[in-house]
Image: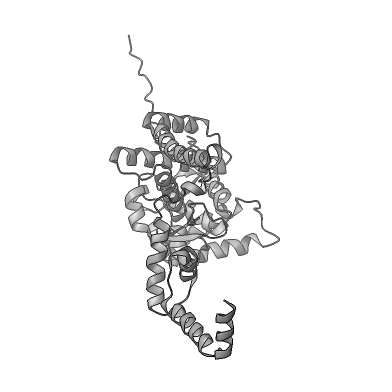
């Protein structure tokens, strides 16, 4: 009996798959000369997902140039500003075959096909012309935060803003490698918590507040993109409940409220009665005070409200020697001026 040989199945050719959607259609991948893509020599995202990445950033930043830059960073391909400008010129051509918001991706990637001839490099590290991008926050050394200051009554002044500047490297050490926009949001949220908790002095509270800020930032981004953020909101609620920050915030608020209630109670509910004038100054402290100040002012030859009050209070107890001498002198002068005959007549009549 002759043995039948089984046909040998040739090994299936290894194919790259898109790391986002999973497609293995090799015609849907852009070629790459990056040394870290050398196994397949292709970008690990398919063409459709590359466009989706671009549209994600476009919806977020509303800036084609900036969105393309972030797409290049995600794909690890060089951002070349001259290539971007050339793609824009091609798209503005009335006879252009590709149209739409994502057409810039295809036009730009087509231009990268000549990167070797133009000496543009192979990866995002070889990017050229980032300084021509408006709104590129990740290259700002300083992160600015706008905050509404409080006036002397500790009320927020809505007409003014304080601008606080932070070193971006310092903030990235705290929050991670976020861009300036995210860093400003995170630090601003942290400062809000610091105010509401009357200071963050414990390491455990510091950690939980930072986690809450990060979660709020993720929720913010999801909602900006029109995505469902319910799961992340649930996670945020669990963080708030488990951290005990709600109770701590309420306790701080209750202290402030109770103080305000006490003041209101004194001013409105139980106002202080007017003091009976007979008992207002039973020890005559005011008289002593007026007497001390007025005497000093009189010695200096000054006249003011205290000296007037002094004269009013002490007029019944005051002897003015100069006035008495004047009165005595006047009386003596009156007597000396009287004729002798008048004096005799008066004696005779008496």
Q: Against 195, is 227 above or below?
A: above
Q: Where in the figure is residue 197, as x and y percent of width and height?
A: 40, 42
Give the residue at x 49% y 57%.
Answer: 151
Count of numbered badges drawn on the protein: 0
Q: Where in the figure is residue 219, as x and y percent of width and height?
A: 50, 39
Q: Quadrant of the N terminus?
A: top left
Q: Where in the figure is residue 279, as x and y percent of width and height?
A: 46, 47
Q: Against 283, is 239 above or below?
A: above
Q: Where in the figure is residue 189, as x and y percent of width and height?
A: 44, 46
- Judge by depth and name the residue closer to the eye, 316 or 289: 316
Residue 103 shows in this picture: yes
- Judge by depth and name the residue closer to the eye, 220 or 25: 220
Q: Quadrant of the C terminus?
A: bottom right
Name the image quarter holding residue 240.
top left
- Judge by depth and name the residue closer to the eye, 61 or 223: 223
Q: Against 241, is 143 above or below?
A: below
């Amino acid at each position: 009996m002759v043995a039948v040989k089984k046909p040998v199945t040739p090994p299936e050719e290894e194919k790259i798959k898109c790391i986002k959607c999973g497609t293995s259609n090799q015609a849907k991948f852009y070629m790459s000369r990056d040394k870290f893509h050398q196994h397949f020599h292709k970008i690990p995202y398919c063409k459709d997902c590359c466009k989706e990445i671009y549209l994600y950033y476009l919806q977020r930043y509303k800036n084609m140039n900036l969105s393309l830059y972030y797409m290049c960073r995600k794909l690890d391909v060089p951002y070349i500003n001259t290539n971007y400008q050339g793609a824009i010129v091609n798209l503005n051509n009335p006879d252009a075959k590709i149209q739409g918001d994502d057409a810039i991706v295809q036009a730009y990637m087509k231009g990268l096909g000549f990167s070797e001839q133009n000496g543009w490099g192979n990866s995002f590290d070889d990017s050229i012309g980032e300084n021509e991008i408006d709104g590129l926050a990740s290259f700002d050394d300083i992160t600015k935060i706008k905050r509404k200051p409080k006036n002397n009554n500790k009320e927020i002044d809505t007409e003014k803003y304080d601008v606080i500047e932070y070193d971006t490297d310092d903030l990235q050490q705290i929050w991670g490698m976020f861009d300036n926009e995210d860093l400003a949001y995170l630090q601003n949220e942290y400062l809000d918590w610091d105010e509401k908790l009357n200071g963050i002095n414990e390491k455990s509270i510091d950690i939980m507040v930072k986690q809450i800020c990060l979660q709020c930032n993720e929720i913010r981004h999801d909602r900006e993109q029109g995505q469902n953020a319910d799961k992340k909101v649930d996670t945020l609620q669990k963080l708030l409940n488990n951290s005990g920050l709600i109770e701590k915030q309420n306790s701080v608020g209750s202290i402030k409220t109770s103080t305000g209630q006490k003041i209101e109670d004194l001013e409105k509910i139980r106002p202080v009665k007017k003091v009976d004038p007979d008992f207002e100054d039973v020890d005559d402290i005011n008289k002593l005070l007026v007497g001390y100040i007025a005497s000093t002012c009189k010695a200096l030859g000054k006249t003011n409200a205290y000296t007037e009050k002094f004269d009013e209070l002490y007029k019944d107890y005051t002897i003015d020697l100069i006035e008495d001498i004047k009165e005595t002198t006047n009386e003596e002068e009156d007597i000396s001026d009287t004729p002798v005959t008048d004096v005799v007549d008066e004696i005779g009549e008496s």
